Image (cartoon, coloured by chain):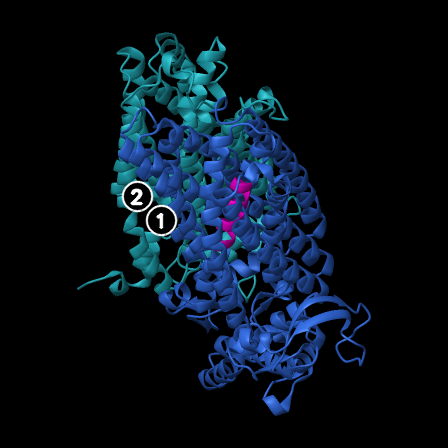
Chain colours: A blue, B cyan
Amino acid sequence: MEDSLVDWSRAQFALTAMYHWIFVPLTLGLGFIVAIMETLYVKTGSAFWKKTTKFWMTLFAINFAIGVATGIIMEFEFGTNWANYSWFVGDIFGAPLAVEGILAFFMESTFFAVMFFGWDKVGKGFHLLSTWLVAIGSNLSALWILVANGWMQYPVGMYFNPDTVRNEMMNFWDVLFSPVAISKFLHTIGSGYVLASLFVVGVSAWYLLKKRDVIFAKKSMLVGATFGLITSLFLILSGDESAHQMAHKQPVKLAAMEGLYEGHEGAGLVAFGILNPNKTIMGEEEEFLFDIEIPYILSILGYHELHAFVPGLKDLVYGNEEYGIMSAQEKIDKGRIALSSLEAYKEAKKAEDIQKALESQQILEENMPYFGYGYLTNPEDIVPPIATTFYAFHIMVWLGGWFTILFVLVLFFLTKREILEYPLLLKAALYSIPLGYIASEAGWVVAEVGRQPWAIQDLMPVGVAATHISSTNVMISFFLFAVLFTTLLIAEIKIMTKQIKIGPDGGH
Amino acid sequence: MVGFGDLDLLTLQQYWWAVVSLIGGLFVFIMFVQGGQTLINKLSTTETEKTMLVNAIGRKWELGFTTLVLFGGALFAAFPLFYATSFGGAYWVWLAILFCFIIQAVSYEYRTKPDNFLGQKTYEAFLYINGTLGVFLLGAAISTFFSGSEFAVDSNNFSHWQNSLRGLEALLNPFNYLLGLALIFLTKISGALYFISSIDHQQIRNRAVESIKINMIFFLVFFLSFLTWIFTKEGFAVDAQGIVFMQQYKYLYNFLEMPLLLGMFILGVGMVIIAVFVAITYRKTCCIKTGGVGIVLTVTALLLSVGLNNTAYYPSTYDLQSSLTIMNSSGSHYTLMTMSYASLMVPFVLAYIAYAWYSMDKVKITKEEIEAPDAHNY
């Protein structure tokens, strides 16, 4: 398949996914924050909490609408741009998407209407329940789509059927409770909660800097920062679990994240580093122009052992006999055997040569774990873009650390001091809103760029997954999406900032 | 205990075709939102009236959106080869449809918000485009189930579309316009019926009734032409060996050979006609229920007929044997079984949708509500 097609298909998927992801995390977290606020209203009966709930709910709706708009394309894009993928794994991948529709989306959309228009039409209790159900529904939809994504990173619960030439599901529970899927789900929704907390804290800080709606802003900030601190800790724990999973399931990604070329026992974590752009996998060049490393941490993160061996890119590409790591070339050879035995199987079937078919099938099954490698040309093809993965990972971690500190500071000055007297902190909180988005997007860059070239880990590279279509078509649709989504984003930001300026007493 | 796992593959495939058909039927019903969007200007004379109309359908648009997503998800899981072939192949038709829905999703929320960048008129135009072009293209896309497309499926079950217009070629076949146009006028009718039931405002109701009279004529013309076309044309049939061949009057025979479907279809069409008749003659306000059930029955029966009774539901005119049937395009037995258990949740979902709908709609939309100072309006 032509390279430019694959690149445009990737670019379009990346574009639409990253746009979608601007809006989703806020929905995931703000849904719960609004529900907490409404619970306070129902418990206290105070008009203040009703007003506060309604204000944040307005912002929720503005964000939600564009999240829905950018979301629909994500589902259909698997078909439009990754048609071969859709056939090859649709038997497994389609199920969580369908279940997502049945179990999550209807919950969201049904109760969304009650949440916004039901204030005077249904009872207080039913209304509060609706608000919680919208929050739960949106998080449930995140569960199913992340189960699907987790499965691409670590395919389980299926077998390859040579008659249909696709993977077929064997165990739904293995797919659903895959450790990669679960840690991915927890880490991703955690990031949504933290981002939404940053949003609430930052917007509140703006009011405080303007010295308006002070009580409203302080109380909102208290809810936001408390939720943010709790969820930050949750985010750190789930991130640790993600790293542990990755060490076992996607060691190449982990090595790229850390710029680790040579494997070590007791490997350290690069706290800060500038990659040497001239470094090659085989070469003797230094890995970093400059770096600060914390010893042993990577081994502990990855394997929960001080002296565990963490393989580097060189080990993973060229193999390391001492530690029993197979080279990429060997995997490519096995992959090619798998592909050719599949062809032999099909021919034997056609010729009704049962003996030959059985033999071929056996060879195929032995080599199936390396099936996707058969499509690769060079051993180096298994390495993702290192710099992108490395920097995205480090940006994410640094910012995540900063957010935790910020929530602690905000809570301290909010409760123990007069926070209005600390404009520097308020400004820091305000400017951390865009940082939250950067960290969140960076997380997805690590997850998705870091797993290249695979559409499905070890089974199907992106080049095979793409729809057969001329690249001009995809290039045109790329730009159509870019223009449309950018236009809608500008509208969203303008409306959102206007509503914030109007404030809790004027807008509805 | 007997479970879905005990059913044979063909039965599960038929069950899932039925589920997909039902979702399709529900989707066309909920497209009263789209039809309503095209009537906003026609049925209103003041800004307040227009806002009442927008808000009436604005509380339902997400259900339609969600149903479309579920329709896609169910097809992906149950008939992945269709998903790969049609979405990847008829690329531009599906992307055009999606664009029409993307612009709908923001328009309600952003329409009257201050500082909304594009202006109220643009968002209203988005709603209009969604209600006309979006609906039309969906109809035309479904019409290719009867007219066929140009694609080949290779030995790896990878699909190769053979027309460089990537789906837009469907518009070169005038017969495909019939269902698209019929759908536009049908959704205008259901949109008007929905307004009549949910808005307590006499002038709007009167104008809605008037609009139904005209739209019903157009609907009948296009729908009957569509039926004449499919009932008289050659259809794509499958024999016991899975060989696809052309058969005269196939789609007519499908209804005659499946009397239950025929009954469903006639009942559905009858209910739509009765709903329209009662709404016009007796000025009843609850006809959306009868009409809605009628639409669901009609569309479900139509979709069922093209997949069952040894019919290739997504035929290829380029290579007849590449045509998709529910047998050769479905998910595995295990996946269909697992999904079948998930589908048991559908009645529960429908029940809470109905409950929430009932709770919200027992208080009709009035001028006072829309003009209330703290109203959340679209």
Q: Chain of mark 1?
A: A
* Stretch of the chain drawn in magenta: A189-201
State yes or no: residue A198 in magenta. Answer: yes
Residue A191 drawn at (x, y percent):
52, 53
Residue designated by label 2:
B349
Q: CA distance from mark 2 to mark 1?
A: 8 Å
Q: Nearer the viewer, residue B93 or A3?
A: A3
**Three-letter code for the amino acid on which mark 1 is drawn:** Leu
* Quadrant placement of the N terminus of chain B: bottom left
**Could you tell me which secondary element the residue under label 2 belongs to?**
helix
Badge 2 crowding class, 10 Å Cα cut-off, few under 14, some 14 to 19, many 20 or more, is some
**Predominant SS of the magenta segment:** helix
The furthest residue to the front: A417
Are the residues at dot 2 and dot 1 in contact (C-beta closer than 8 Å)? yes
Q: Nearer the viewer, residue B56 or A206?
A: A206
Residue A230 drawn at (x, y percent):
45, 54
The furthest residue to the bottom: A322
Q: Is residue B147 above or below residue A355?
A: above
Give the image quarter of residue B170: top right
Q: Is residue B260 above or below residue B359?
A: below
Residue designated by label 1:
A103
**Three-letter code for the amino acid on which mark 2 is drawn:** Val
